[in-house]
Image: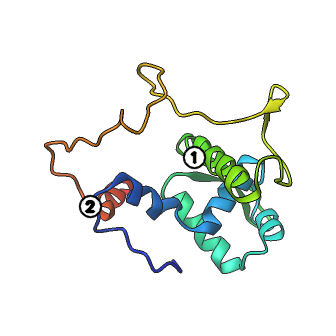
C-alpha cells in the first residue's frame, strides 16, 4: 500500500492500529471525515492526493470497517464514505494529535485554527474509564496476559473474515 513498514508479524495493539491508520494520508482522510467530507472528489480537492493513493486508502478503511460506503447516485454509480462506530472511536486519537501539533509544532496560540469547547480552548485529557483518574506515568504498567495472542496480520485477517 505504498508503505515500507510491515507490522503484520508483531503482537502489539499499537502496531495493529498503525497497520490500519498509520499512513499519513489516512489520518488526513479521517480528519476530513470528522469534518464532514464524504465524497472522493471532496478529498481529492482538499488533500491534493493522487487518485490512486486516495482510492487505496479509502478501500483499506472500508475493508477494516472504519468507513462504510453508501450509494448516492445510480447514473453514474457513485457512493460516499461514512464513519462507522469503529471509525468514530478514533476521534479522541485525532483530537490528541491535533492538540499535540498545536502545542509542540506551532506553539501555544500560533496554529492557524484551534479547537474550542464551550467558548474556551479545548484540551483533551486521558482518564481511566473505570475510576475517572488521570494516570501518571508511574501508574500504568503493561501486564502480559496468559493467552496465545495472534499476530497483527492474523488478528486483522480474522477481523476481516
Q: How many marks?
A: 2
Looking at the rendering, which quadrant does residue 8 occupy? bottom left
Q: Who's the residue at 83% across and 69% down the image?
A: 45
Would residue 70 be visible to someone looking at this image?
no
As drawn, the label of residue 93 is 1
Mark 2 or mark 1, which has the lower sequence index?
1
Q: Nearer the viewer, residue 73 or 117?
A: 117
Q: Residues within 10 Å of mark 2 (few under 14, many from 20)?
A: some
How far apart, in angstroms, are the residues tagged by discs 2 and 1? Answer: 23 Å
**Residue 29 in the image: x percent, y percent?**
68, 60
Q: Nearer the viewer, residue 59 or 46?
A: 46
Q: Which residue is mark 2?
A: 151
**Residue 116 in the image: x percent, y percent?**
80, 35
Would residue 156 be visible to someone looking at this image?
yes
Q: Is residue 95 left or right of residue 137?
A: right
**Residue 90 in the image: x percent, y percent?**
57, 45
Q: Is residue 119 above or below residue 146?
A: above
Q: Is residue 51 above or below residue 140?
A: below
Q: Is residue 159 left or right of residue 70?
A: left
Looking at the rendering, which quadrant does residue 155 occupy? bottom left
Q: Nearer the viewer, mark 2 or mark 1?
A: 1
Q: Classify mark 2: helix, strand or loop.
A: loop
Query: Cβ–Cβ below 8 Å for labels 2 and 1?
Result: no
Q: Classify mark 1: helix, strand or loop.
A: helix
Q: How is the image coloured?
A: rainbow
Q: Who's the residue at 60% across and 52% down the image?
A: 68
Looking at the rendering, which quadrant does residue 77 occupy? bottom right
Amino acid at each position: 500500500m505504498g508503505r515500507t513498514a510491515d507490522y503484520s508479524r508483531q503482537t502489539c495493539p499499537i502496531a495493529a492500529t498503525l497497520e490500519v491508520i498509520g499512513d499519513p494520508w489516512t489520518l488526513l482522510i479521517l480528519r476530513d471525515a470528522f469534518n464532514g467530507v464524504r465524497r472522493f472528489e471532496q478529498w481529492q480537492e482538499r488533500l491534493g492526493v493522487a487518485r490512486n493513493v486516495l482510492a487505496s486508502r479509502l478501500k483499506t478503511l472500508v475493508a477494516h470497517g472504519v468507513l462504510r460506503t453508501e450509494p448516492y447516485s445510480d447514473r453514474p454509480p457513485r457512493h460516499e464514505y461514512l464513519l462507522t462506530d469503529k471509525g468514530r472511536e478514533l476521534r479522541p486519537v485525532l483530537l490528541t494529535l491535533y492538540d499535540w501539533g498545536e502545542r509542540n509544532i506551532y506553539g501555544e496560540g500560533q496554529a492557524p485554527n484551534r479547537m474550542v469547547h464551550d467558548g474556551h480552548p479545548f484540551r483533551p485529557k486521558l482518564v481511566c474509564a473505570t475510576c475517572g483518574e488521570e494516570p501518571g506515568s508511574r501508574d500504568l504498567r503493561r501486564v502480559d496476559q496468559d493467552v496465545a495472542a495472534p499476530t497483527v496480520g492474523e488478528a486483522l485477517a480474522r477481523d476481516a473474515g
